[in-house]
Every structure is written in structure tokens, then in C-alpha cells.
Image (spheres, grey):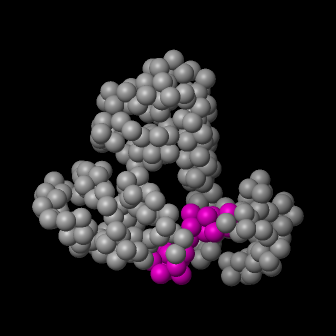
Amino acid sequence: METAERELLETLEELGERELQRFKDKLSEIQPKEGYQQLPSGSLRNAAPPALTDLLLLFYGTDYGAEVAAEALRAIDQGALAERIERLIDALEREKHYFEWHQKQEKELKPLRYEITPFLPGTCLLNDEQYQRIRAEKTSQEQMQKLYELVPSWDEWHKDRLYQALKETNRDLVEELEGGHFVDRHREQLIQQVSEVDGVLKLLRGHTLTPEQYQSISTGRSNVEKMQKLYELVPSWGREQKDRLYRVLYITNGALLLESAGR
């Protein structure tokens, strides 16, 4: 996911100011396929490539978001960049098939509490010999112990790669160790300090909030009151809904989220 997001962002950053505006204009015209909402023109208007990337992933997900981006690029005569995105789509498809196959194999063998698959050779974390040695251990706990024998010699970049891989494959465990989801851990700060609440609500409407919930929250007299009303719903949400709230907050209140993440 992070690799795809970075590739999409780097592609959009290749566009000049004029081409970027044409790209946004085209995005606002594209009618998405059934089950997806059209990107809000108001959010597109002043969006830089990072915000555009977040909007595409938020509304369409990785696969379809890349497809829509490629369609818009071709429409503005940016065929080379569209081909770059299409190669990304092909890579995502191959990766998805691989992991579906791999997960099936793992289930047939033995379920693991800790999944080692993100540390395959080629990810710059383990070489072939290290990978085979760790996989030879009988239990997931022994595999993790063997993996952690290497960690003290790693630099911050390698440790961050391990952290991201664990988040991808054992997210519930990581969130439990960290004290819960980001939007849960920073509940009070977000309620008190989110300044662009109306933008948050608009991006959540139709996806995470029903029309009735949106109207009810929008009647709040202040940003704090609106966020309090919004957070009355959060305890009943699953991971996908909380992830969407996090991404929407990042789009609309990015500086605050970066500040929160540093605490």
C-alpha cells in the first residue's frame, strides 16, 4: 500500500502547474463506476499532489484510484505518466494474486500468530540466507525470536520497515501494543484542536456517515461540539471506518496530525 501511494504521488508530482490543473479538472468530470462517489470539486480545487493522492485513495482505494488517475492522465495527453500508473496497476494485481496464493498456502500448513511474509528476500530487510534460516524455525514465536536477533544491528530505516510490515500483517496486535488506533489514542486532542471540521464531515458523508448522522453533527454550534458529536460514533466503528477518519483528518488537518504523531 505505501509503495503504491508513493508511486502515485511521485507520478503526479511530475505534472507542471498547468498540467496539474488540467488533471484536476478532468478528475472532476470522470463519472466513477458503480459503488463509488465522484470526487468533490471543492476538495480538488486547491489540492496539491499529496492531497490528490490521498483523495484518490480515500474515495477509490489503491487499485481503482490508480485506474482513475491513469484515465485522467491519458485524457490530458500525458500518455507516458499514464503508462507508469498502468504498470503500477499491473504490479498491484500480481502482488494481490501472490498474497492470495501465499495466504492459502499458510492456512493449509499452520496458522501463525506472527506472519513473516513481509520480510521476503528483496525487501532489503533479509537476505536469502537469513530468510531461510528464520523460516526453518518450528513456531512463529521462535521465528520472531530469530528475527529479533538481527534487529539490534539495524538502522532506523530498517526498523521502520519492520514496523510498517508488522502493521500490515499484525495490525490488531500493533495497535493493542500502541494503545489502540490513532483516532482513539488522540481523541481529546482531535476533539479540541481540529479546525477544519466541516471539511472532515463532507468527506465522511456517504462513506462513513449516513445523511442523518451528517446533518445531526453539522448542527453543532462549534468545531469542538461537532467533533464531540462525531466521536460519539467512533467507539462503534471498525478499523476501516477509523482508517477513513484518519485519512480524512490528514487531508484536512495535516499539520495537526503530524504534530500528534510526534507526541
Bounds of the magenta segment: 161-180
For the point 63% across and 64% down, the residue is 165
For the point 29% across and 52% down, the residue is 199
Name, please, the residue furthest toward the top. 77
Percent of width and height locating residue 28: 34, 31
- Snapshot quadrant of residue 189: bottom left
Name, please, the residue furthest toward the right. 129
Percent of width and height locating residue 87: 61, 33
Relative height, residue 36 to residue 181 (above, below): above
For the point 55% across and 42% down, the residue is 9
Q: Is residue 75 visible?
A: yes
Q: How many marks?
A: 0
- Snapshot quadrant of residue 124: bottom right
Q: Is residue 238 visible?
A: no
195, 211: nearer the viewer: 195
236, 8: nearer the viewer: 8
For the point 49% across and 67% down, the residue is 259
Is residue 103 in the magenta section? Answer: no
- The kind of secondary structure the magenta stretch mainly shows is helix
Percent of width and height locating residue 3: 61, 49
Relative height, residue 233 to residue 177 (above, below): above
Percent of width and height locating residue 219: 12, 61
Is residue 24 toward the left or the right of residue 213 in the image? right
